[in-house]
Image: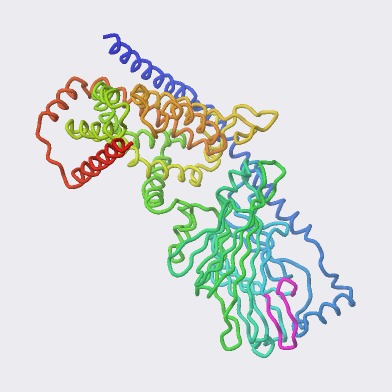
Amino acid sequence: MEEKKLDINSIIGFVLIFAILLGWMYLRQPSEEELAAQKAQQEQLEAQQKDSLQKLDTQTVAKTPVRLDVNDSTAISKYKSEVGAFGFTQVAEGETVLENELLYLRISNKGGQIVEARPKEFVTYDSLAVHLVKDGNADFGLNFSTSDNRVLNTKDLYFEPSVSSSGENQVLSLKAKVNQDQFLEYRYEMKPNDYLVDFTIRSQGLESVINNSKPVELEWNLKGIRHNKSVQYENRYTRLTYKYEGDKISKLSESSELDEETETEVSWLSYRQHFFSSILVSDNPFESAELSSRNLVEEESKETKFTKAYSSKVPLTLTGGELAQNMHWYYGPTDLKVLKQYKTYGLEDSIPFGWGIFGWINRNVFTPFYAFLSSFLPYGIAIIVMTIVVRLALSPVTYKSYLSQAKMKVLKPEITELNEKYKDNAMKKQQETMKLYNKAGVNPMSGCIPALLQLPIFYSLFMFFPTSFDLRQKSFLWAEDLSSYDTIFNLPFSIPFYGDHVSLFPILASVAIFFYMTLTTGQTMQMQQQPGMPNMKFIMYLSPLMMLFFFNNYASGLSLYYFISNLITIGIMLVIKNYILNENKIHAQIQANKAKPKKENRFQKKMRQMMEEAENQNRATRRKK
């Protein structure tokens, strides 16, 4: 009676805690006046950011360093001597800006390459413009040999720019000329409201200028610019991803100091920088590509400016001694809603949803479901609603798990008796225990199977929260950004594996998981510890501690999910324990099962025979001694 009373008190306590939590969240919701003030403040901030970005455009162009003094005849003469036939090109420092509603590009005459790329709608964690290319962090060029034995790189060549239009599209043609009819051309075409920019490399009349016996090699290098509050966390999701041999997708290591790979038939290369990507797409797959990724992050530091150094070397095929390569540049968010617009190239596959069934669940279930919820709910509330739906969907699995525990509890006295009776004979004890399980109709592994069934959900959500673009810079309660960690206190020092701050959501999640494990492993800990089995009491204390340390630097949205998920699971299990399952009925059912004749299947028969044979061998060995 006392135990039943305690259980009811636990349920009441849980309901009160959950009600207080929901009430607190409700009271924390801003009033209409506060919402209006926040909206006005947000509009003012956006206006300030727009002004600062416009100023940044002007300042950046004005501060472009001069590489060659066009009035210095000696320098010009030296340059023309070095580039040989391409000295016909008019040497002029300068840059051309291409921009639409979404993207700003600045392209230099020197090298004909992009020297600034900025998605216009986004800012970093400290309200600066998000740059994918800036201040020389990237370079692009072709290495080739000429018929007069010169080795040139287009990064060193000057191009003559020409701006035109094709309908609503902006077109920039840059030509490195041998004469008016012989040239190497880079052609950029930007469409309205589009992150994808068409990019073509072609040559005309250069079959006698370019040495066909040696390969023309495209080389693209980029250092990922830091955008997030935690550089280590950002770096964990910063990887070189590529599509090759049809529909195969692969990645270089996210943590190795240096990772290199050579692949064939490469369709696109993605230099992913967590929530933003720089992607080079080819209409005709590159025959091969040498890829490398070098880790630039050694520790968590506010001074670290770059995450990884990427490099790709791609030989280009000459057709009739000429170049003709149709490609595209993508500089924009790593967002499924945006990348799905480019289904022709499969760019959405560059998002790290996870592998196999986990990625499928993340991509086709959680991502669209959360997008639906967040379309009419605040982002934090949408996480809570999604958590409730997930836990209710998994409640039958929770029921199966707890039913297995209840059956094991009923059998505990008989198992204890067998352990005592055969304490000196482990083989016989195991044999009799399995016989008891078989008679009672109890499978000791049935409690583990439901947990295994939840693993795809667990891992899918583990990948969803850190990579969901919808959560980026979205606040909830004290968390300023649900895609990054929340901070309630900054430490004056850094704790290894923990960090230099205290996050509240991981603490709440750790407390919740402790009570959950107390509830689920309490019966297991009361049972005699089996040899070779893990110490459940140790695991009960270790798991929340690992949660606390590991998730302190993870997305606060993920910690919020685990906190709410464990609260709901505790509630479901208390309801199952006190109002659904009846131990007396379970005991009666087990006794009825034991009274029924049991027919062994082939596997059970084989296992029994093996155990009996092993027991006979042990007896024979003891007799000889």
| Residue 120 vertical placement versus 160 (above, below) | above
Q: Total number of numbered labels?
A: 0
Quadrant of image for the N terminus: top left
Is residue 278 among what the camera can see? yes
| Residue 191 vertical placement versus 430 (above, below) | below
Taking 481 as reference, is 87 left or right?
right
Taking 10 as reference, is 141 left or right?
right
Q: Which of 111/196 is in front?
A: 111
Q: Which of 606/444 is in front?
A: 606
Residue 392: x percent and y percent? 31, 34
- At a point 60% along the width and 81% down the height, the residue shown is 323
Residue 607: x percent and y percent? 23, 43
Residue 541: x percent and y percent? 47, 26
- At a point 67% along the width and 83% down the height, the residue shown is 183
Instruction: Give the residues in magenta.
Output: 143-157
- At a point 46% along the width and 58% down the height, the residue shown is 349
Does the magenta segment cover residue 184?
Answer: no
State how the image is colored.
rainbow
Q: State the residue lying farthest toward the front.
A: 624
| Residue 158 vertical placement versus 235 (above, below) | below
Taking 72 as reference, is 311 left or right?
left
Q: State the residue lying farthest toward the bottom.
A: 208
Quadrant of image for the C terminus: top left
Is residue 576 among what the camera can see? no
